[in-house]
Image (cartoon, rainbow, N blue to C red):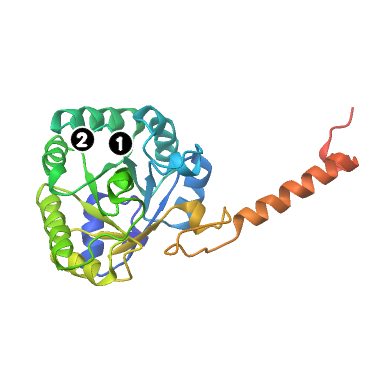
Amino acid sequence: MTQNVKRVRVHHLRQAKEQGERLSMLTAYDAVTARIFDEAGVDMLLVGDSIGNTMHGHTTTLPVTVDDLIPPARAVARAAQRAFVVVDFPFGSYEAGPEQALATGVRLMKETGVDAVKLEGGRRVARQIRALTDAGIPVVGHLGYTPQSENLFGGPRVQGRGDVAAERLSEDALAITEAGAVAIVLEMVPAPLAARITEIVAVPTIGIGAGAQCDGQVLVWVDMAGMTDWSPRFAKRFGEVGAALKAAATSYIDEVRGGTFPDAAHQFDA
């Protein structure tokens, strides 16, 4: 279904779930990669606060601010012709309550042109989700391992193991769906639990380290493309772009140092 639409919208996400069509999602932080992924046919693009780790050199997402996310979100929204573009709420921009969340959401929507926002948490942020939804701002939820809470979790750890934790996560999923979330990212959740949540909620679930039964999958693009020497266990490397880029840079440097670039084909005559 989504392959045939000119622009992916909120109702297409729900239709994809109803029709059993898997949704694809990748992060993007600039116009160049966003355009490539959009032309490849990705359904959703996430301007994630993972920009802190992948592009800004931080060890966590916590230092990322709203000001950090506006320029890349604007660039991705401009570049994407078809994909549904989502931007993260960074840490500290919504936790205080619905009023703070609404102010952040309005600013992000007005200044970037994205299609939706994403925030982490379950029942504790249901009021924020409702305030945003009531204002006409689509919200994607995020449950399981939520990186902004990594200090509380003790690092990247699978969430929802055991009956009590699984029930709590399921209740969170229902709560944010009832509050108006249009989709839910499930990160580092046991596959059987993710399958159960996918079954009980009416909106699409987008898995990352949450098994194959989710309604869609998301990966951080640098992990997907093999841009670094390390990637998470759940992130399959679909290419070795980092190695290819290094090889290209090495060839360029060698030719510059050897005086073979630029040659006659790459300069102008009088």
- Amino acid type at circle 2 is Glu
Q: Viewed as shown, does residue 72 lie left or right of 134?
A: right
Which quadrant is home to the C terminus?
Answer: top right
Q: Residues within 10 Å of mark 2 (few under 14, many from 20)?
A: some
For residue 259, side relative to residue 197 (left or right): right
Asked if the residues shown at circle 1 and circle 2 are in contact, with their CB atoms under 8 angstroms apart, the answer is yes
Which image quadrant: the N terminus? bottom left
Task: Tell me the residue that label 2 is attached to.
Answer: 95
Q: Look at the image and tell me whether residue 206 can be seen.
A: yes
Q: Is residue 8 above or below residue 111?
A: below
Q: Position of residue 179 (x, y in %)?
A: 11, 47
Percent from the top left, x then y, of residue 57? 51, 39
Using the image as rendered, state which of residue 9 and residue 152 is in the foreground.
Answer: 152
Q: Residues within 10 Å of mark 1 (few under 14, many from 20)?
A: some
Query: Tag 1's secondary structure?
Result: loop
* Closest to the observer, 171 or 5: 171
**Rendering coords of residue 164 (x, y %):** 13, 63
Instruction: Say the numbered circle drawn on residue 91.
Output: 1
Relative vertical location of residue 201 with respect to residue 118 in this rendering, above or below: below
Quarter holding residue 42: bottom left
Name the outermost residue toward the front: 154
Name the residue nearer the viewer: 153 or 176.
153
Amino acid, disc 1: Phe
Label 2 sits on a secondary structure element that is loop
Identify the residue at horizontal 34%, vertical 50% (top origin). Answer: 7
Q: Is residue 196 left or right of residue 252?
A: left
Q: Residue at x 34, y 30 (%)?
A: 66
Q: Is residue 201 visible?
A: no
